Amino acid sequence: MRIALASDHAGYVLKTVVAEHLVAAGHDVLDLGTDSADVSVDYPVYGLAAARAVVGGQADRGVCFCGTGIGIGIAANKVPGTRAATAHDVTTARLARQHNDANLLCLGGRVTGPAVALDAVDAFLATAFEGGRHVTRIAQIAAAEGPRTADPRTEGPRAADPRTADQERQPTP
Ligand code: RB5
């Protein structure tokens, strides 16, 4: 599976742990940054990048990381077509797939340990959407979204990587 990863500085260490795990399992990892735990950056930049990679088709699923997994998920969900779920364990990661057809998992590097995070990621990748009664609810969410844009500055492989997207490369000191 092609999996986009992205984090801010607070999620960077957990991202590296998950990246190693996914590569070892044979997945194709698209790492959209950030590249350090020591330089403070803005989590929306990275959440939006991961969401655009998934919605734009460069990745099948995404996993995002910030301190709590909350902020980066809020940002990611602003990209139409994204269903980002913040999870804290295997159960919430599994249900995010079964009930919500989540395409992006968000984890908190300051609140979730590596062993639990890896189990949650594995559950997220292995679990199918249940469909049934949940289809109508997903459709209601999609209907509430604005129209998708075709603006190359905000979509496509170049814009998906915050290290090459000039429009959004504004790290915080
Ligand atoms: C960064 O300090 C922190 O606010 C961020 O990683 C995240 O937890 C926000 O939701």
Image (cartoon, rainbow, N blue to C red):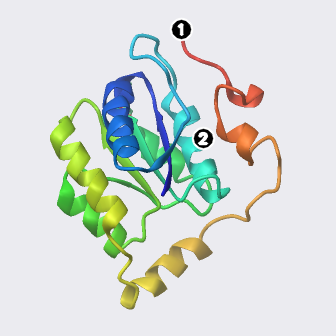
Circle 1 is placed at which residue position? 173
Against 143, residue 8 (above or below) is above
Compare residues 65 and 76 and report the one nearer the observer: 65
Residue 55 in the figure: left or right of residue 31: right
**Which image quadrant is residue 18 in?**
top left
Which one is in front in this view, the residue at disc 2 or the one at disc 1?
2
- Judging from the image, what secondary structure is the residue with disc 2 in? helix
Against 85, residue 68 (above or below) is above
- Residue at the image point whose x is 27% and y is 68% from the top: 95
- Residue at the image point whose x is 78% and y is 57% from the top: 149
Residue 112 in view, yes or no: no
- Label 1 CB sits under 8 Å from any ligand 1 atom: no
Residue 119 in view, yes or no: yes
- Judging from the image, what secondary structure is the residue with disc 1 in? loop
**Classed neighbour count for the residue bearing mark 2: other residues with Cα under 10 Å, few (<14), some (14–19), many (≥20):** many
Tell me the tag on residue 49. Answer: 2
- Label 2 CB sits under 8 Å from any ligand 1 atom: no
Q: Amino acid at mark 2?
A: Ala
Q: Position of residue 162 (x, y in %)?
A: 64, 30
Q: Amino acid at mark 1?
A: Pro
Of marks 2 and 1, which one's residue comes earlier in the chain? 2
Against 143, residue 28 (above or below) is above
Q: Position of residue 38 (x, y in %)?
A: 40, 10
- Residue at the image point whose x is 72% and y is 39% from the top: 159
Q: Position of residue 139 (x, y in %)?
A: 54, 80
Q: Position of residue 84 (x, y in %)?
A: 44, 56
